[in-house]
Image (tube, rainbow, N blue to C red):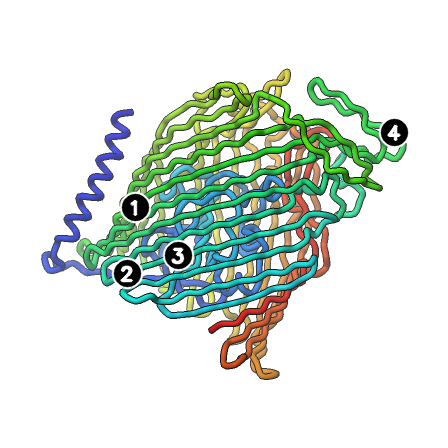
Amino acid sequence: MKFRLNLISTALLAVLSYSAYAEEKSADTEKLEQINVNSEELQQLGYHAIGTSSVSKVNVPIIDTPTTVNVVTSKLLEDRKPNDLVDALSSVSGVSQANTLGGVFDAVQKRGFGGNRDNSIMRNGIQAGPSHNFGATTETIEVLKGPASVLYGIQDPGGIVNVITKKPQQQSKHVIGGSVGNNSMWGTQLDSTGGLGNGFAYRFIYDKQEKNYWRNFGKIKTTTYAPSLSWEDDKTKVLVAYEHLDYTQPFDRGTQLVNGTVVNIPAERRLDEPNNQTTGKTDNIQVKIERKLNDQWKLNFAYGYARDKYFYRQTRVVAVNTDYTNSLRYTSGATTRTVAPRTALRRLEKQAADQRLHSASLNLVGEFAIGNVANRFIVGVDASRNYRTTGPVYNNGGWSNLNIDNPVYTDPNAKETLAANNYQINNVKTLGVFIQDTAYLTDNLIVTGGLRYEYFDQVAGRHRIGAAFKPNTDQHDGKLLYQFGTVYKFTPNWATYVNYAESFRPQYSIASQVDSNLKPEEGKSIEIGTKYESANINATLALFNINKKNVAESSTINGDSYLNIVGKQRSRGLELDINGSLTDKLSASLTYTFTKVNSRENSLYPVAIGKQLNGVPKHQAALFLSYDLGEMLNGHWRIGGGARYLGSWYAYTANYKTAYKIPHATVYDAFLAYETKLAGKKLSLQLNGKNLSDKVYYQSTSGNADKYIVPISLGYGREVVLNAKLEF
């Protein structure tokens, strides 16, 4: 233990000591080839981006990185008008939705791995909270595929998502906007930025949205305000940003599979209650400082605070009797109930949660040459404290029945019953040090290597209200991780690459019986691919193989829940992404994904071996096109649209003995945009239609499955929204 902490402390001192040395060092002392630290920036050209992605932490162009990096540009986001983060990422291969906890969380699977609290979502490269990370402040989204633990610490091996927010600009720009749509939708927006003099600039964003839920009851309300301030001179850049969100939305687990068939009622009909609502708020504070030490070195400091707090009521559907004549006998533990024909049995629950995340990093970034070999180098140290308290939790607050054909909603309230899991706690502290170098061995051959040592301290458990906290997980350990990759450039625009990378994640469960000595989950990935980029288009084709071991699953024996390591999983697949301008007027975004992810070993449920993991489609694709119609009717017109294809996927009962195939679906979207002048100011109107055919489709499982039901989430129904904004 002492050795591990000394290692990290020594690395931190080395970073600070070398940064002081580099600032004092004269540029004339060595005649090495110099590479301008700021020579590469991400350039967005319509639907595609070239240059450097911030998710890689160093100024290495995307084409020179031996990994898949996808960028969802601001123009593509503006044209598509996504509703949430998963919707925004539908134009990226290898991404699908996981269990969102009734819509509370951003739940993103990457290459078949990931969940709703997997820490894989970043804001501006800083660890973000688990919910509502896409909104009015979003500028661009980056996705780094494959294990990212060397750069970002504890992660699943599928990859990370980096949401880049809008920053203050020196040039004044002010935008006011409004929106109206079906489902009684309306919204107002304000975005103002500009210089304040002496190197200062500000930005203030305000956004308020309200609409009725697309199903038969529920309302969605969000209010965002986000002030930010920046300052810079010739050597230093400082950014301080704050964002606050208040929200109210339905807590909706979707519909139910009964014996493999969706309950035969209209998709709009909910079987819970109107008081199934989530109310919450999120706060994000970020401070970033960049100090240029000389022409070759700079020091980056970042601090982030993210808080997510919410409360929800849930009338959880636990069984549905779809038969018209016979009753159903429901048994769970000591509870036995008779469910009448055409009736849903529901358990009353309510829950609160509060998560607070602090993270900080200090990185020394250098660009230098040794002989004829140019290097882009980073060494850094980072730390985080992620404290999550769920509670009070009342999961057994009574029972209620509902006729599924002629429902009468009564808004029953859950009783506040004391239980062993009224409070659930998971506190994780991390401390890591990492180093990575990209060496340009020749004009064509680029090698990247990195390693990290990550230390973590974790305490998790649960307790009854008024009782002492009883940890069932209390562990600390460390892990050394590696990654290595090579890029070979056939031409400046065309490259091929190969990459090996590792990941790890400590086990966590609030199960009453947990062995704190359970080994962390570990992932290893090999990826090969090819990239092409130009001023008009970029494309990436990747093949990957990810092996994950020490996979854990929970089970229930005599009313007690247990966590056990059961074996291994593997994900193999192919991903294709093409973005850019096909002609001067036609732009396109095209993705295709094939993912085969299954259990390789499972000592608890051998029947799961070889089966595609729950909720992961084997095939996915998306195409979005836009066409510039030119000048007409005193303004400029653009039109576009596309389709999203979600392949069939499997849902399983709790013991994997029964598999249900969820059907594939294709969803169509379109837009029409018009720009003109109003009193000399730019006026923009845009009409968006989403899910134009009003297709009923299913995105993921949405709760615990058993022999009675498998809950699955529903995709949004048809939406038509008109947006207007005035810029000055």
Q: Which residue is label 3 attached to?
A: 228
- N-terminal of the two: label 3 or label 4? 3
Tag of residue 436: 1
- N-terminal of the two: label 3 or label 1? 3
Tag 4 secondary structure: loop
Tag of residue 326: 4
The CA span between labels 2 and 3 is 14 Å
Asked if residue 519 lies left or right of residue 717, the reply is left
Percent position of residue 549, x then y: 48, 31
At label 3, counting other C-alpha atoms closer than 10 Å, the crowd grade (few under 14, some 14-19, many 20 or more) is many
Percent position of residue 394, x then y: 62, 28
| Residue found at x 50% / y 77% | 681
**Camera-side mark, 3 or 1:** 3
At label 4, counting other C-alpha atoms closer than 10 Å, the crowd grade (few under 14, some 14-19, many 20 or more) is few
Callout 1 touching callout 4 (CB < 8 Å)? no
| Residue found at x 78% / y 23% | 337
Residue type for callout 4: Asn
